[in-house]
Amino acid sequence: MITAALIVAAGKGERAGGGVPKQFAPLGGKALVARAVEALAAHPGIDSVHVVIGAGQEAALDAALAGRKVDGVIIGGAARQDSVLAGLETITADRVLIHDAARPLLPTAVIDRLLAALEHSGGAVPVLPVVDTLAVHAGSLGETIDRATLVRVQTPQAFRHDVILAAHRQWTDVPATDDAQMARAAGVSVALVEGDTMLEKITHPADFAAAEARMASRLVSRTGMGFDVHRLETGRPLWLGGVLIPHDRGLAGHSDADVALHAVVDALLGAIGAGDIGSHFPPSDPRWKGAASSRFVEHARDLVEARGGIIDHVDVTIICEAPKIGPYRDEIRARMATLLSVDIARISVKATTTERLGFTGRGEGIAAQAVATIRS
């Protein structure tokens, strides 16, 4: 069974305020649509992730995803149902999860429940009970409504692809409130699974603060430390923090020997209990001979994200007598921020000497240590 995820991110999001549509606005340092993409892409039951955007939003999506690739980008229509239909017509799959980018915090357990429900039903939606008293608004307070028979419906909504595509194609009624409404109208049995308060929709400016609070309530802060050292050797380029620095010697190693990035990788891996750089990229493996250490950093970043982690801060200290790191500090910070997909304000780079003591003091090599703080 091939399962695809379709993220609807084509709206204008004007009620949320800000200078960009809400799906491209940041939440905890990452755009809403990026968080939705990461959650769905990380699930082992999902084979591909596709995003539907509005015409002219391609650059905004690229910036929001910060280098992360999706399996397809589709231009949507004027209304949500037009956008979903465009996506359904494009993708090829047995099952599809249709999700709104405005619900960026997507627990793995909800996806598990939806996929399990599709084993015996043509569709499934996550729901939450209604806990407030409901009443008719008639200028003044009207009659109350029995909330025991009501639920709040969330996304993602899961369907057999052929079933929901047919339902969309035959829909001719007023604008649909969601895809499940179309499925029910087509005679499809839609199962209910337990939803999650993390999936609350972001609509208004205050919803961003509420979402940040929900994230914080479920995340634990973790710290990892990393240390690396390489000797200096004539005839090699000097890479530090992902930046090529002019110097009479470079660092020797199986890869490009970037001690700063190696220390960052070990710090990130340590924070999630995932071993060390050598266990992921053994120096005995010829694939990593001369490899750019940026690949190692991106691997560690992806592991953090796959576990639902957020990189809060990385602090790196480079230990050497020469070259001077100060002139390259901001360039190194910017490069690390790009590799880690975080704001540059979350990256600190410092340099120190050992007062001419030890191998770094004698100019024989360069060392680096790093501390990474994540929430997961």
Image (tube, rainbow, N blue to C red):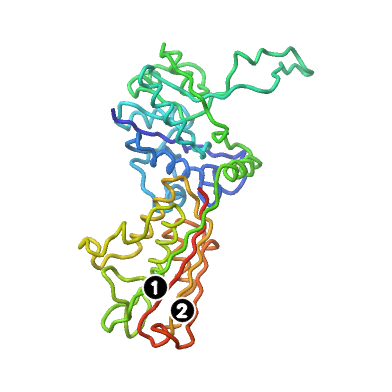
Picture residue at 77% right of the left edge, 19% below the top: 139
Instruction: Tell me the tag on residue 102.
Output: none
Residue indicated by mark 2: 325
Q: In this orientation, which residue lies closer to the viewer: 27 or 257?
A: 257
Picture residue at 62% right of the left edge, 43% below the top: 213
- Please state the horizontal and vertical placement of residue 303, each as a whole percent of the image: 39, 50
Residue indicated by mark 1: 240
**Amino acid type of the residue that numbered disc 1 sits on in the rendered structure:** Leu
Quarter location, residue 297: bottom left
* Circle 1 crowding by C-alpha within 10 Å: few under 14, some 14–19, many from 20: many
In contact (CB < 8 Å): disc 1 and disc 2: yes
Picture residue at 43% right of the left edge, 65% below the top: 226
- Please state the horizontal and vertical placement of residue 153, each as a whole percent of the image: 54, 24
For label 1, the SS is strand
* Circle 2 crowding by C-alpha within 10 Å: few under 14, some 14–19, many from 20: some
- Structural distance between the alpha carbons of marks 1 and 2: 9 Å
**Amino acid type of the residue that numbered disc 2 sits on in the rendered structure:** Ile
